[in-house]
Structure formats: C-alpha cells, structure tokens
Amino acid sequence: MKYVPSLAMWFCMGFAAASHAPNLTPGQGWDAFVGTWEIVGVVSDAEEQVKTAIYKATEEMNFLTRGIARDRLINSQKPPKQIRMRRQNEMFTIHPDTFSALSMPISGKAVKYEDRMAWVSLDNGGGRLALRQISENRQGKRENVYRLQDSGKSLFLEVTVSSSSLPAQLKYTLKFTRVK
C-alpha cells in the first residue's frame, strides 16, 4: 500500500492564514527567541494535553470519521521535547526535534516547502513580543505563536490548527524553558 501523507501530518508541520503580520527590523527582537528550548515537565504529560485538545476539537465529528481523525492527529501532533531556534543573516530557523528544520526569511516572505507555504514574522501588538510561524496548504492551516515570559527564560508555544475537515479549531499551549 502506498503511503500518502495525511492531513493531520501536514497540520503538525504547520499551516496558517495568507495575511502576513508586519515584521520588525532584524535587530528588534528576533534574537530574543534564539536558543535551545526544552519542554517543561515530561513529554508524556504534554502528549496527554495535546490528546485532550484533539478529542475536544473532534467531538462533534461523525463517529465513523472521528476515530480516524483522532488517530491521525494524535500520531502527527507529537510535542517536541526540544526546539532550536536560530537566526542567520536574513533567515530564521525553527527546528523542533520531532520534525525537520524550517528556515524562513525574516522579511515575512512566504517560502514553499513541499506542498505548503510557510512564513515567520514578529508581532509587537499589545506591547508583548510574539514570533509567529505560519504555514498553509489547500487542506488547512497551522499557526504557532511563540511568546517569551520570565525575562526570556520561558517560552510558550500556542498552536492553532484549522481545517474544513475539522468541526472546531485544534488549540493547545506548551511551555518550554531556555537551556542554551
């Protein structure tokens, strides 16, 4: 049987809306996110948190498709134990240990990866700096919003997955701490 990447797998890799948030200049915050981040607690607790969010997002689905959707999402929404972020010149790279590294221009320009478009931007709305990693394809979108707390010692990853195949958005938040 030929393997076809599932919708859920692409969600885990990231999808999002086509509008881009305005970027700050290179020296205005990108480097605050650079480093190695490790999940707070044990990965199994984070997996259970994600599983609960998946069950909530799929609870209104037809019982025939709900089980399939849940299995695919659970298999594809693996929380990373570690995320490495770096900036090299005009490129910003985000590398969760559960997936390949994704390098995107800090200009906010979208880049093509396989069958999806991805981009990254900084948002300083409300006086709080946030890094947005957005990607999308024809099946859906994912937005990862990274927010710093505790003077840059903690990182919160807020994930929102949307698709016309899901009756509700899948949303969850994971906490990381800086290790390097």
Image (cartoon, helix red, strand yellow):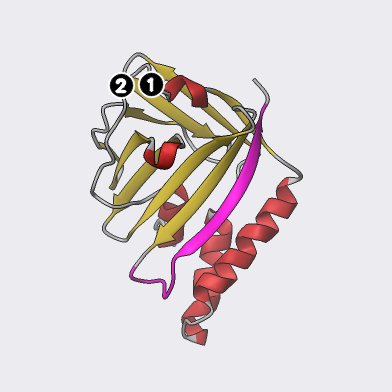
Whether residue 176 sits left or right of residue 21 in the image: it is right
Residue displayed at 45% across by 56% down: 160
Residue 133 found in image quarter: top left
Query: Which dot marks residue 25?
Result: 2
Q: Secondary structure at mark 2?
A: loop
Residue on which the image places disc 1: 28
Q: Is residue 149 magenta?
A: no
Q: Position of residue 36 (x, y in %)?
A: 60, 25
Q: Is residue 62 above or below residue 82?
A: below
State the residue lying farthest toward the right: 42
By secondary structure, the bulk of the magenta-drawn segment is best described as strand
Residue displayed at 38% across by 41% down: 125
Residue 53 can be seen in this image: yes
Label 1 environment density (alpha carbons within 10 Å; few <14, some 14–19, many ≥20): few
Q: Is residue 88 above or below residue 98?
A: above
Q: CA distance from mark 1 to mark 2?
A: 5 Å
Q: Position of residue 77 (x, y in %)?
A: 55, 54
Q: Is residue 22 above or below residue 144?
A: above
Question: Amino acid under label 1?
Answer: Gln
Whether label 1 touches label 2, CB < 8 Å: yes
What range is drawn magenta here?
164-178
Q: In terms of depth relative to the viewer, which is nearer, 120 or 156?
A: 156
State the residue lying farthest toward the top: 89
Whether residue 9 sits left or right of residue 19 in the image: it is right
Label 2 environment density (alpha carbons within 10 Å; few <14, some 14–19, many ≥20): few
State the residue lying farthest toward the front: 127
Residue displayed at 30% across by 21% down: 25
